[in-house]
Amino acid sequence: MGQKPLTFIRQVITLCAYPSLMNDDRFPEDVKKRVQDILDSCGGKSVGSYSDSTGVEVIKQHVAKYIERRDGFPSNPLDIILSTGASEGVKCVLSMLNHPKNGKPPGVMIPIPQYPLYSATLAEYGMYQINLSYLDEDNAWALSIDELRRSLNEARKLCDPRALVVINPGNPTGSVLTHENIEKIIKFAYEEKLLLMADEVYQDNVYAGYTISLY
């Protein structure tokens, strides 16, 4: 799949957790440089100390640079909030949306099939789950804007829709949305004033060229 080995990341984590190993010649200099930058950005120069509520500053800067390389647009570290994993990040965002309006619970549009984190969290928070069960299997599991709008209008009778979740590549379908489909989804969310939650945790797990399924 063209993914890079995790050796560098593992070494950085190791030295951050046990800084005494910085004197060990078995670790490369680029690893030690990255570790020193991270520790210098931590309170008390230790990853065991409290960090800023939005995350360690130098890591946010690295994330911003990554987004700029990936998307080709400027990214401000001040607009980035780090979480202790995707699940915690999703829960934090949904909790901010969890406020009834005019006696109706907040609703969130999620694709079906989906990673159960979303349905479980919505149930836990007492929010309304708007199922997008019309994913077109014959069309590479693409999202239909007409069906999005129909589902939204139906849901408004029972809840106050706040957000649209898009999982790309899909989990568990493995589908990858086309550029055209993504543009239409963004436009739809903007027109309907919906927060767009892009779950792209598997963005690097995309096969190129011809592949043979093991099943």
Image (spheres, rainbow, N blue to C red):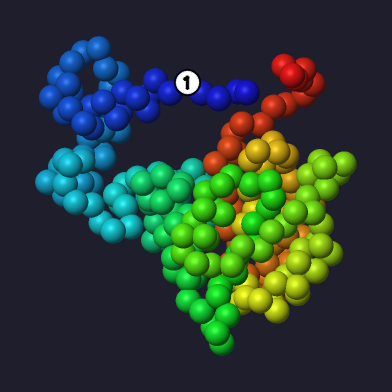
- Residue farthest along the right direction in this orientation: 138
Q: Position of residue 48 (x, y in %)?
A: 17, 42
29, above or below 57, in the image:
above
Q: Position of residue 139 (x, y in %)?
A: 86, 44
User: What secondary structure is found at the residue carrying circle 1?
Assistant: loop
Residue 125 shows up from this direction? yes
Q: Is residue 180 left or right of residue 170?
A: right
Residues 178 and 61: in front is 178
Q: Position of residue 51 (x, y in %)?
A: 23, 52
Residue 169 shows up from this direction? no
Q: Is residue 192 left or right of residue 64?
A: right
User: Looking at the rendering, in which quadrant would you find the C terminus?
Assistant: top right
Q: Position of residue 151 (x, y in %)?
A: 76, 67
* Residue lying at 41% horizontally and 45% vertically, measured from the top left: 85
Q: Amino acid at mark 1?
A: Pro
42, above or below 98, in the image:
above
Q: How many marks?
A: 1
Residue labelled with disc 1: 5
* Residue lying at 64% horizontally and 57% vertically, measured from the top left: 110
Categorize mark 1 by other alpha carbons within 10 Å: few (<14), some (14-19), many (20+).
few
Quarter of the rendering containing residue 102: bottom right
